[in-house]
Amino acid sequence: MAIAIVARNKPVAAADAQLARLGAIKGLQPFTQKMREIGLAPLRATGISVFQINVGKFCNQSCRHCHVDAGPDRTEQMSRETAEACIKAFAQTDIPTFDITGGAPELNPNFRWLVEQARALDRHVIDRCNLSILLTGPKRDLGEFLARNRVEIIASLPYFRPSQTDAQRGDGVFDKSIEALQLLNRLGYGVPGSGLTLNLVYNPVGAFLPPKQEAIEAQFRRELARQYDIKFNHLYTITNMPISRFLEFLLDSGNLEGYMERLANAFNPGAAAGVMCRYTLSVSWDGKLYDCDFNQMLELPLAHGLPQHIRDFDAAKLHQRAIVVANHCYGCTAGTGSSCGGSVV
């Protein structure tokens, strides 16, 4: 299988070291204290409407902002046994959405089986796709597979110009992304009336908050249509989280304190009330349970006394659980908020 290797940054610090670094920023009010001030401590789940599984860190790209620290050299992959445990737990519930992420989730050998099993349960399935994987060797029929199974595609595209995209994702990735988007359009994705949903994701290139979602969506829609005749349904803005590779970038560039101050100053109680961890359960490649994919990468497990592994799944105990928070959570609560579904408010 051909893998397009992108140069990686230096290895990221261990999860506990990242948490310690974020907790030691001078003058930054602890996130837990901020939540107490607005009456949202402890933050509690409001149910589970999204069952999100991260099937591994193996990826054909090594993006500079990646909070997963994914790449072609990562070997962590969800096993068939764990995948079966996920489907067994999911089948016990009426959770409407089965959300598959990675890495490049399509590179996991159980990806198609997971999609088929979730669709057989008549649930909505999301594939978080980096686009270029759709053009990779034996994966070239993935588009047809996803369309046949009516899978929603949420695709990352840093910008509608090559320079910004390639700066974040590697040389030549923009052209591959455009080719993949045109392929998806030919299959009906993003085309009005097709029922095949294609949503894009925008992350800022640099230590900035994303612009207003509606404004940047309009720009993407206009420029992608004008230059490449590409259609899509919606664009989501996601704030770069100060963890993993992006944290290393902030440290190396001397921007960590300024970025965290920017996030904290933009704290929005409305966004805090609507954060995705309140309705999402995150399952890691090895079956461990977390409140969100970001906590997963920082190895912050569910609160004490709750099920810690998918084999011990208990929906009743998880629906209104207390959520584990730390200073990185300022990323999801700044401005109009940030989630896997874009702006919160």
Image (spheres, grey):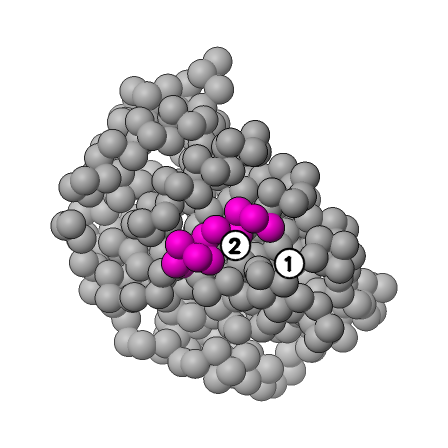
Where is mark 1, residue-wise? 313
Task: Give the camera-side residue of 110 and 343.
Answer: 110
Q: Is residue 88 magenta?
A: yes
Name the element at disc 1: loop
Which residue shows up at 48% across the image and 84% down it? 17
Name the element at disc 2: helix
**Does residue 148 appear to the left or right of 123 in the view shown?**
left
Dividing the picture into quarters, in which one does residue 11 lie? bottom left
Compared to 120, does 114 lie above or below?
below
> As shown in the figure, which amino acid type bears the numbered disc 1?
Phe
* Residue 201 visible somewhere in the drawing: yes
| Main secondary-structure element of the magenta-colored stretch | helix
**Magenta-highlighted residues:** 78-89
**Residue 47 shows which numbered tag?**
none
**Does residue 250 appear to the left or right of 124 in the view shown?**
left
Instruction: Determine the CA span between mark 1 and mark 2.
Output: 9 Å
Dividing the picture into quarters, in which one does residue 10 lie? bottom left
Q: Position of residue 167 (x, y in %)?
A: 27, 55
Which residue shows up at 28% across the image and 71% down it? 9
First of labels 1, 2 by sequence position: 2
Q: Is residue 211 magenta?
A: no
Which residue shows up at 58% across the image and 61% down it? 311
**Does residue 32 appear to the left or right of 174 in the view shown?**
right
Q: Position of residue 142 (x, y in %)?
A: 29, 34
Where is mark 2, residue-wise? 85
Q: Position of residue 31 (x, y in %)?
A: 69, 72
CB contact under 8 Å: marks 1 and 2: yes
Which residue shows up at 37% across the image and 40% down it? 112
> As shown in the figure, which amino acid type bears the numbered disc 2?
Ala
Compared to 307, does 144 lie above or below?
above
